[in-house]
């Protein structure tokens, strides 16, 4: 039986989605392709509950299957419940967009007949169809790496891009929230996301975000809005402390869906390589992303113009480390003045 007929008419498909915000956003084209190719199938997205809100109101899935810990090392009752649920739903096809052993193990022990994914983490025997990660994995975007699994399902890769779905009500509430903050409806709004969940090596210097903010405020019409999760609250407070007007902060005070809706309403986002960067790209919000320890070729804002990325070439990058072990030259070489200039160019396009 060839690879196409193996998955020609699945009735119930489950997709193990990635655990990080940005990775999950970059995996959404797979959901679009599955829905296009299997319009009558029941499609379930399985993901860590922390990132699951991104897939609420998603038009290409029928169900969200969330869980609290993306690991094999669960308490016995949790394991039993997860296995029982997977078996009871009688999925006939599982697609793994994670590379962990545990994700393959859960589908294997739950007796899902077809289990498709990359050969990684010694799990190839748990998969019924698998391929090695592409040789081009360091020189192609992660969206394209994900799509390299599609031929195993008989799906030709297409130009589908990451996307997120918001309701009209969510967009309206976001506009109202900006007004409640004191931002005039006609004011250009540049949002700034100065953190990144993975680690400090991905983050531009706080004092330079501060310099850029000061420069932006030279335009009397413009407002600056800071984002960040609860762990970044002190960072945002440090950066915004000198400013008494036209600088606002929602750090630590938004849910993931609220953040997504707010990003859809701003004029431009300045960000490190982070989840909010991928959210903005998926929503079509103009952005400027600053890259240091990671590669924009691999995880840059997909489908966005070259002006959306600012990076300095240094010999030690990309290193993919959480913390810089040397002098942080990759980020220090990005000046506040060139970021300001690039932001103005993007804002006036």
Image (spheres, helix red, strand yellow):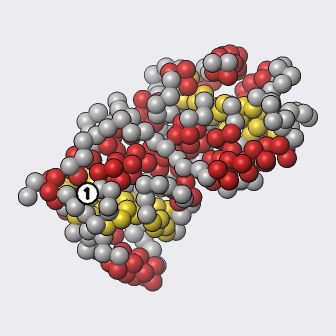
Who's the residue at 84% across and 35% down the image?
Answer: 184
Could you say which quadrant of the image residue 238 lies in? top right
Who's the residue at 79% across and 43% down the image?
Answer: 178
Q: Could you tell whether 201 is left or right of 320 in the image? A: right
Q: For label 1, count other residues whose C-alpha is less than 10 Å away and answer few (under 14), some (14-19) or many (20+).
A: many
Viewer-side residue, 341 vs 321: 341
Who's the residue at 16% across and 52% down the image?
Answer: 4
**Residue 43 drawn above or below residue 199:** below
**Which secondary structure, mark 1?**
strand
Residue 291 appears in view: yes
Q: Could you tell whether 212 is left or right of 141 in the image? A: right
Task: Tell me residue 235's x, y (percent).
Answer: 74, 42
Who's the residue at 39% across and 39% down the image?
Answer: 160
Quadrant holding the N terminus: bottom left
Q: Could you tell whether 77 is left or right of 231 in the image? A: left
For disc 1, the marked residue is: 116
Task: Tell me residue 230's x, y (percent).
Answer: 71, 53
């Amino acid at each position: 039986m060839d690879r196409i007929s193996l998955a020609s008419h699945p009735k119930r498909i489950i997709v193990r989605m990635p655990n990080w915000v940005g990775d999950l956003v970059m995996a959404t084209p797979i959901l679009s392709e599955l829905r296009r190719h299997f319009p009558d199938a029941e499609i379930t997205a399985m993901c860590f509950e922390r990132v699951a809100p991104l897939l609420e109101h998603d038009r290409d899935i029928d169900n969200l299957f969330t869980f609290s810990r993306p690991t094999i090392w669960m308490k016995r009752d949790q394991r039993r419940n997860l296995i029982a649920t997977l078996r009871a739903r009688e999925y006939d096809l599982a697609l793994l967009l994670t590379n962990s052993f545990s994700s393959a193990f859960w589908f294997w022990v739950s007796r899902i007949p077809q289990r498709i994914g990359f050969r990684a983490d010694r799990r190839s025997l748990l998969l019924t169809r698998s391929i090695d990660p592409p040789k081009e994995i360091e020189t192609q975007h992660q969206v394209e790496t994900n799509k390299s699994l599609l031929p195993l399902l008989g799906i030709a890769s297409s130009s589908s891009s990451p996307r997120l779905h918001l309701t009209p009500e969510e967009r309206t509430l976001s506009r109202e929230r900006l007004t409640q903050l004191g931002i005039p409806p006609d004011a250009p709004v540049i949002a700034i996301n100065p953190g990144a969940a993975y680690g400090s090596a991905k983050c531009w210097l706080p004092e330079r975000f501060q310099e850029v903010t000061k420069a932006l405020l030279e335009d009397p019409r413009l407002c600056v809005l800071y984002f960040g999760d609860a762990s970044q609250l002190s960072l945002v407070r440090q950066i915004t402390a000198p400013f008494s007007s036209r600088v606002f902060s929602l750090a630590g005070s938004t849910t993931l869906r609220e953040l997504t809706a707010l990003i859809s309403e701003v004029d431009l986002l300045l960000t490190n390589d982070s989840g909010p960067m991928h959210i903005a790209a998926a929503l079509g919000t103009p952005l400027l992303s600053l890259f240091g320890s990671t590669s924009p070729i691999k995880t840059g804002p997909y489908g966005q113009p070259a002006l959306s990325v600012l990076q300095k070439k240094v010999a030690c990058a990309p290193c993919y480390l959480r913390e810089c072990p040397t002098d942080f030259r990759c980020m220090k070489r990005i000046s506040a003045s060139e970021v300001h200039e690039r932001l103005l160019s993007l804002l006036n396009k």
